[in-house]
Image (tube, rainbow, N blue to C red):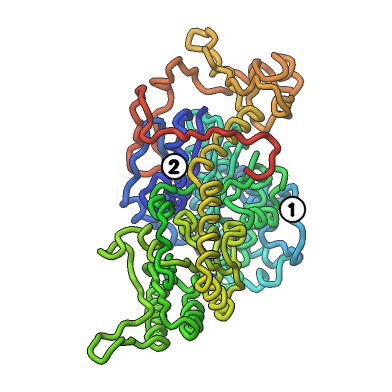
Amino acid sequence: MRIGLLTDGGYPYATGESRLWCDRLVRGLPQHEFDLFALSRSADQEEQGWVRLPHHVSRVRTAPLWTPEDGTLRGSGEPRLLARLVTGGGVSYGRRDRRRFAAHVRALATAICADEEAGAEPVTDGGLFTEGFYGLAELARERGGLHLALRSEATVRILEAASRARGAGRTVQSATVVDHLAFAAELERVLRPLSLDWYDPESLGAVDLCHAASGGAAAIPGLLAKRFFGVPLLVTEHGVQLRTHYLAAPDAPLSAPVRALLAGFHTLLAAEVYRQAALVTAGNTHVRRWQQRCGADPAAQRTVYPGMAAERFSAVGEDDDAGGPDTLVWVGRIEPAKDLIALLHAFAEVRRAEPDSRLRIFGAPAEGGEATTYLAHCRALAAQLFPDEATGAHTEGVSPVTFEEIGGPEVPDLAEAYAAGGVIVLSSVVEGFPISLVESMFCGRATVSTDVGAVVEVIGGTGLVVPPRNPRALADAYIALLRDPERRARLGAAARARALELFTVEQNLAAFRGIYLELMSHAPVRREADAVDADGEPLLFAAPAEARLLGPWTQPQPAAVGARVAGWAAGGVESEGEAEGVPEGERAGDARPARHPGRAGRPGRSPQPGPERSARPEPVAPRHPGPASEPECVCATACGPGDGDA
């Protein structure tokens, strides 16, 4: 089948979020064809280039979310600007289009500014938000762009009126004109995917399934593909975008009203994404609970743990060496959320009980000046708590706490860092999916962790968990493992067995292989033009084999908005399409050009220029028989329909 993989600031770029996971997914499923639709976050990311793509990636389309328009609010203060709005194609809006635009922005602004009581249940039907959101999408598709319109004085006036209206939130009501200008600029940036030229039968309309690698902006093209073409949407989140927005809001250079308006928009967008998705997969139960709180239906959720390469840690995990029995190891990015201050104070308690113990901290500061300052503060505190100690009058003093970077002669790689200690510690106060813990479990190491994020779910019963911001509890747990080597070895062996069972690349690929087949058999996008060749003769294997498997997913389903139903649909021939009220002529005329056997030389699939496209030409990989760049996973267990966690 053909998968449209939607990313935001990640794959296929060499840097960004979820890059490694997407690359493993694409390479691990060579039986499927992938079209990539990527949003870039910065000019620097585009300059870094792309990773090498496998041969079954047939198309890559990109669009920036970082253009210089971010810092320029065009048209503010100009008289009668709304009457002279110009789209990306150079066509002015007429009177009817101006009225449509104003009505859709008004509906969107009213929904965003509405005051929702704390703890209220999420909206179940979308209401004004969906009316304004899809209305703007249809206008952008017809007229070619909304950039200037969303940054216009008219938009600011509509936002100001909505924030002053009855029912608006208290924080929103305090917004000034400057706040509305800032929010209009942010709203235009978030809604740029509405103006892309991806929504035609040869682009997103040609895929069988849209798979968004995250929520937020990455899922917007998937929403429109379902709206316009009936393409089912699969959303995968390893971290909830709304939660990320809340965590970053206090540090953002925005006022409280602007943050409240953005939070309202992202909340409504997340609810719409979860409502329209055929299935929502979460990277862990912690993310799954956030999704439910934002409106996701538990029946449409599934937990699929992110796959990690266990081979790089096999040498350490299978070795009988338990590492330095008196050495405590911490691995990660150094930043305030990791709470190394509490770890240093905890280790001070450990040193009083066990004077020979050591603490080795492996990592580099995260990006930004704050992380660098935090590292300097941690070094100063360590020097104060643990002055250099010498074993004799003529020996050099050595501190029991060291800050090291991976890649040196003593610790050439990550596996060696975990092998250096007998116990691995995680002291974070904020954590999503704890990657460092999974890596230490692959290495067969016992762990002491704080109870944050998905730590308890990942560890299970194979490690010790203590409350965050509690140095005394952290010290007691480490001392208990330090004085009981048999328990330490037993926990390490159990941790390795658990990691190999749940967190490997193979289990992740097996889960998504089954999910793809399940979604396609349950709600395939059926196009009659795909079932015949150029001469009108039936195409071999045009109907997917899974559509003929007996099961609850083959029962007749109501057609999606804009979906095209073919005569070979499961459960009937022509009568099913007629029962849904879809005339034969509309089903056939709405399809893309016919595909030929062998799938080589697709007519009408060449990229088309547009204002949102990247300047880089779209690579089309050569299509030739042969093995993929990486072998397919040997584990092919498919997840059954309606099961809980995968």
Residue 117 vs 320, above or below: the answer is below
Q: Can residue 39 be seen?
A: no
Q: Position of residue 594 (x, y in %)?
A: 49, 17
Q: Position of residue 560 (x, y in %)?
A: 68, 32
Mark 1: secondary structure: loop
Q: Which labelled disc corresponds to residue 123?
A: 1
Q: Residues within 10 Å of mark 1 (few under 14, many from 20)?
A: some
* Residue visible at 76% across and 57% down in the picture: 121
Q: Position of residue 165 (x, y in %)?
A: 72, 65
Mark 1 or mark 2: which comes first in sequence?
2
| Image quadrant in which you'd find residue 166 | bottom right
Left or right, 105 with reference to 212: right
Q: Nearer the viewer, residue 266 or 71?
A: 266
Inter-mark Cα distance, 1 to 2: 36 Å
Mark 2: secondary structure: helix
Q: Amino acid at mark 1?
A: Val
| Image quadrant in which you'd find residue 557 | top right
Q: Which labelled disc corresponds to residue 88?
A: none
* Residue visible at 74% across and 53% down in the picture: 123
Is disc 1 in contact with disc 2, using a CB cutoff of under 8 Å?
no
Q: Position of residue 300 (x, y in %)?
A: 69, 43
Residue indicated by mark 2: 24
Left or right, 38 with reference to 563: left
Q: Can residue 308 be seen?
A: yes
Foreground mark, 1 or 2, reads 2
